[in-house]
Amino acid sequence: MKILQDYSLNELQELMLQYGEQKFRAKQILDNLNLGKSISSFTNISKELKGKLLNEFADLPLKIYTEQHSKDGTIKYAYELSDKNIVEGVLLSYKYGNTLCVSTQVGCRMGCKFCASTLHGLVRNLTAGEILAQVLTVNALLGGKIGKHRKITNIVLMGMGEPLDNYDNVVKFIRLVSAPEGLNVSPRNISVSTCGIVPNMYRLADEGLPVILTISLHAPNDTLRKSIMPIANKYKISEIIAAAKNYFNKTGRRVVFEYALTDGINNTPECASELARLVKGFPTHVNLIPLNEVSERDLRTVTHKQAEKFADFLKKYGISVTIRRTMADDIDGACGQLRNSIVEEK
Ligand code: SAH
């Protein structure tokens, strides 16, 4: 079944004309969708139009399958899609607002050694509307509406999947969620995280969407990177850095590098100085993440002390750096963990 949330206002207007309906119905439908409503619960359109829609479109693109609440307030959701596939998301609440982490694919084909999302490969891409529906569903669950009554203030594409491996749907999602007649989340409050698919980093720089580009680097040289991230066999770190500089030049946005600290692998002082040399010279920020240990994977995390030591090395080189607070490690916090536990149960 098709996904109604894939449609922009213009596309809904065309659909109404095809249906022989009046154009203004499109906005009524969009207003309902923005509130996270299922087609069958729309109250301001005729039974006949509802019937036509339900013939063609899933009543709801997804529903919440389970929730896990962490002691630190983080909530992890598993969503069931209309074809019964499961994807996951995380809601992080801060003083300034709520950040929702969304998935872009069912599974992932990137094969990173430390990541649970990729253990069973890629099942399929999510459509733009399925990514959007994650935001609409949680926004509604929190009692949010649209515009300034929105509850979701920031979005990070850091759930399951590689966003730049599902490029067209991801860009369409960003356009839909930032549209004034949609939730109207500024692209400036949206982060797109990538393992470094270089050609699509260049394309993204030219979309006119000033999102934050976050690059999962995790290693400061190609040899080490190849041992943990297969994508490193395709693109060199030097190519990633060149694409990151281009992104900054085109969008004016500083680029964020993610670096998951793994004990004995990438946390030596030599790694820190190599990393510093890479990210120096243009506006960047390094986000250190103590590895979230995944039971299927044989990699160990670092202590907070070790992470601070690594951060101090980087600071000496004048690098802007933060250590991401480890959240939700009492639940299936690492991306892909919750889905894996559900798929195994199912
Ligand atoms: N595919 C995208 C986005 C999804 S993952 C990417 O690679 O950026 C979001 C972030 O979590 C990435 O930086 C990813 O490398 C990191 N990550 C995955 N598994 C992790 C784990 N077990 N511990 C810490 N970070 C992890």
Image (spheres, rainbow, N blue to C red):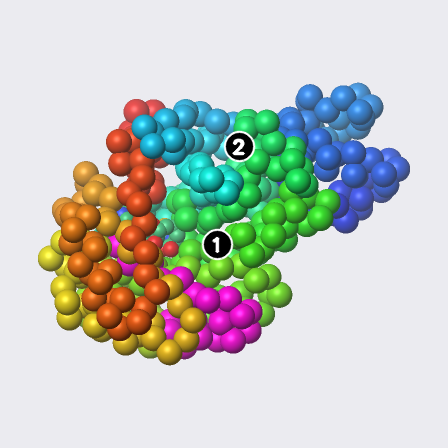
Q: Position of residue 235 (x, y in %)?
A: 34, 71
Q: Is residue 320 left or right of residue 304?
A: right
Q: Is residue 105 above or below residue 328?
A: below
Q: At 43% across and 65% down in the image, what residue appears?
A: 255
Out of 332 and 167, give the one closest to the viewer: 332
Q: Is residue 29 above or below residue 293?
A: above
Which SS class for mark 1?
strand
Specify the segment rendered in magenta.
Answer: 240-260
- Determine contact: label 2, label 1, CB under 8 Å: no
Does residue 86 appear in this view?
no
Residue 317 lies in quadrant: bottom left
Would the CB of label 1 be found within 8 Å of ligand 1? Answer: no
Q: Residue furthest left?
A: 264
Does 328 lie within the magenta span?
no
Residue 335 lies in quadrant: top left
Quadrant containing the N terminus is top right
Question: Which numbered circle lies on residue 305?
Answer: none
Q: Is residue 257 left or right of residue 275?
A: right
Q: At 55% across and 27% down in the image, what residue appears?
A: 141
Looking at numbered disc 2 in the image, what kind of residue is underneath it?
Val
Q: How many marks?
A: 2
Q: At 52% across and 27% down in the image, what residue appears?
A: 63
Q: Position of residue 237 (x, y in %)?
A: 31, 72
Counting residues from the start of the chain, the first of labels 2 and 1 encountered is 2
Q: Residues within 10 Å of mark 2 (few under 14, many from 20)?
A: many
Q: Which residue is mark 1?
A: 191
Out of 236 and 292, give the one closest to the viewer: 292
Distance (Cα) linking label 2 and label 1: 18 Å
Q: Is residue 169 left or right of residue 122?
A: right
Q: Residues within 10 Å of mark 1 (few under 14, many from 20)?
A: some
Q: Which residue is mark 2?
A: 138
